[in-house]
Image (spheres, rainbow, N blue to C red):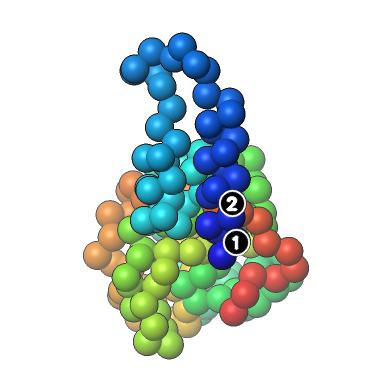
Amino acid sequence: MRRRLAALAALTACLIAAPAAASPQSAPDPIGDLLLGALTGAVPGSPQFRLKASLYHVGARGVGVLDSLGCRVVAMRTAAIDTRVIPRRTVLFIEETVGLRMPDGRVHDGYWYASDTGGAIKGQRIDLFTGSGSSSMKPMMRLNMSHLTVSKVGQFQGCPPA
């Protein structure tokens, strides 16, 4: 419900802010943005990135069970980011992860939580936490890790939901 209200608020803002004499090439498409947002879960007008991704898991050298916020890392939900590109506590939507199997058997909805950082994560990169042991990375191996579509869709407080 919150996403729908946010999408409607964004649509209203787009319609109010749209210049009356805009040329066809530069004219905003708030209805198209709203439909795309409904399909992807992204809020219309949200920043979108093409990021190179890598994977990490508990058991990898130097990886513990806490993220940089001091919260427990959550399999297939925690993302490590460069805070100069994406602020911590940002809810992300990664289009390519929709439909992947999660460790508990559910299907992934594409939402990740930027709650971790890493020394090797610089610039347009993202590191996705897959779970415990290298076998947890298997569902993610089919993705093109050099170009993931990542959208900022919100903020969270406290620790990411488990």
Point out residue 8 in the picture as x, y percentages from the top left corner: 55, 48
Does 83 sit above or below residue 114?
above
Q: Residue at x 52, y 40 (%)?
A: 11
Q: Residue at x 57, y 38 (%)?
A: 12
Which quadrant of the structure image shows residue 135?
Answer: bottom left
Residue lying furthest bottom: 104
Q: Residue at x 52, y 24 (%)?
A: 18
Q: CA distance from mark 2 to mark 1?
A: 6 Å
Q: Is residue 82 visible?
A: no
Viewer-nearest residue: 38 or 121: 38
Left or right, residue 140 beside residue 154: left
Q: Secondary structure at mark 2?
A: helix
Point out residue 98 in the picture as x, y percentages from the top left corner: 35, 65
Left or right, residue 9 beside residue 97: right
- Label 2 amino acid? Ala
Which quadrant of the structure image shows residue 22?
Answer: top left
Q: Secondary structure at mark 1?
A: helix
Q: Residue at x 52, y 18 (%)?
A: 19
Q: Which residue is mark 1?
A: 2
Viewer-nearest residue: 31 or 58: 31
Does 26 sit above or below residue 59?
above
Q: Quadrant of the C terminus?
A: bottom right
Viewer-nearest residue: 156 or 66: 156
- Label 1 amino acid? Arg
Circle 2: is it few (<14), some (14-19), or many (20+) Cα within 10 Å? some
Does 70 sit above or below residue 15?
below
Asked if marks 2 and 1 touch (Cβ < 8 Å), the reply is yes
Left or right, residue 39 beside residue 152: left
Q: Which residue is mark 2?
A: 6
